[in-house]
Image (spheres, rainbow, N blue to C red):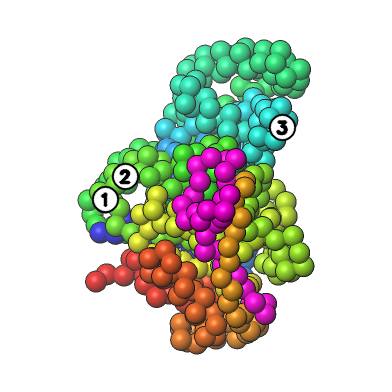
Amino acid sequence: MTVAVVVGTQWGDEGKGKVVDYLASKADVIIRFNGGANAGHTIVSQGKTFKLHHLPSGILYSSKTNIIGNGLVIGPKKLLEELEQVKAAGVKPNLFISPRAHVVLPYHFVLDGAEEAKKGKLAAGTTKRGIGPCYSDKAARFGIRISELLEPTLFKEKLSTMHTLKSRMIEGVYGMQLGSTFEDIHKEYTEYAQKLAPFVADTNEIIHSAIAKNKKILLEGAQATMLDIDHGLYPYGTSSSTTAGGACTGSGIGPTQINEVVGVVKVYTSRVGSGPLPTELFDSVGNAIRDKGGEYGTTTGRPRRIGWLDLVTLRHAAQVNGLTGIAFTRLDTLSGIQKVKVCTHYLLDGKKVLSQPSSISDYSRCKPVYKEFAGWQDLGKGWKTAAKKGYKSLPKEARAYLEFVSRSINVPIYFIGVGASREDAIVLKDVFRRK
């Protein structure tokens, strides 16, 4: 039995979709364990591009069991749109939704924007998809679960109470109008419930039955380590547990049942949102990387902030996730640059810093210290050839760069992405290969 977790090691947008898509082809069960429509991953399969937000990457395989875990907050409208997208491509979605997952409601969308506007410099730069307010209600034991959405009497009762309180908050605290009546929301979400009902199942039983049968299980995370509610750069993160620990709580799988934790590492840094980013580039090199890599948010379309690779961040990710392997992505994007850099540590008030500061004020004053590497040539169409021939066919400068990063965080290389499609990858270790 192999239960593998894939997590982002940086700020999100590392290319997890590509890694998960490859591993999903080998797995029997694919589980998404956190986040909601604030997360986006792009998958290129057989020449078609899919931009997904809720659905596990394995949804493109009708033969695989795909699960939306209890750790998610679900926007029913967006989820149904995604299902229609894959159906239109001729895919029959084999999907099961945990009844314990929570529902994003119209109040959450309004409050998300209102709260962000009032936070000033502490605004996290959210996607305004209602994720934070929904998780807040979950923690306050005031949310509505999928199971309750499907129970007409209970749903109407809980929604009525929520509508009264949230409307007063929106109007009284933020001076805004909700714009929807109770009747409008109840009718809309009752229709969603009817459409989602066929997909709702006892996912705990499905998952643990698969474990008992020694099935290959893949746990897919959204966002990344530095956005984690506990271990990320608080408050400039997300509202869920994005690390390997979140895979346990967001799926119902115990930590002793997980064999592999694969951390996805983009060979440079990118992020969307507010907060300090020590290695951020504001020059032509950063602009060139952004344009070549198409670094614009899947969910928002916002241009991503670009920086050099940061080993302080990667060491932190290796520690809190217990990484067993790393999957590099975008090696081709960084090609063609004469000199590339890696941040080996920070200086804070003249002192060397190797660990991730927990204080936001300290972190904002950290200055990166770099090690410089010779760049490598852009192989153009030759990247596909390199993917077929294997690791030794990569430019020696690129291999030196990757091996330095691997040694620095003491985690072996499992996977190297050299292009957009599933086939553009070099696999050094397949976590699902039977030994």
Name the one closer to the observer, 340 or 164. 340
Q: Which residue is mark 2?
A: 253
Badge number at residue 257: 1
Of pointers 3 and 2, the one earlier in the residue sequence: 3
Q: Which residue is mark 3?
A: 120
Magenta-highlighted residues: 335-363
Assign the N terminus to one quadrant of the image: bottom left
Residues tagged 2 and 1 counted as in contact (Cβ below 8 A): yes
Q: Is residue 93 left or right of residue 320?
A: right
Q: Amino acid at mark 3?
A: Gly
Question: Looking at the image, which residue is at 59% across and 74% down?
Answer: 372
Q: CA distance from mark 3 to mark 2?
A: 39 Å
Q: Is residue 413 above or below residue 80?
A: below
Of badges 3 and 2, nearer the viewer stands 3
Q: Is residue 231 left or right of residue 178?
A: left
Q: Is residue 198 left or right of residue 249?
A: right
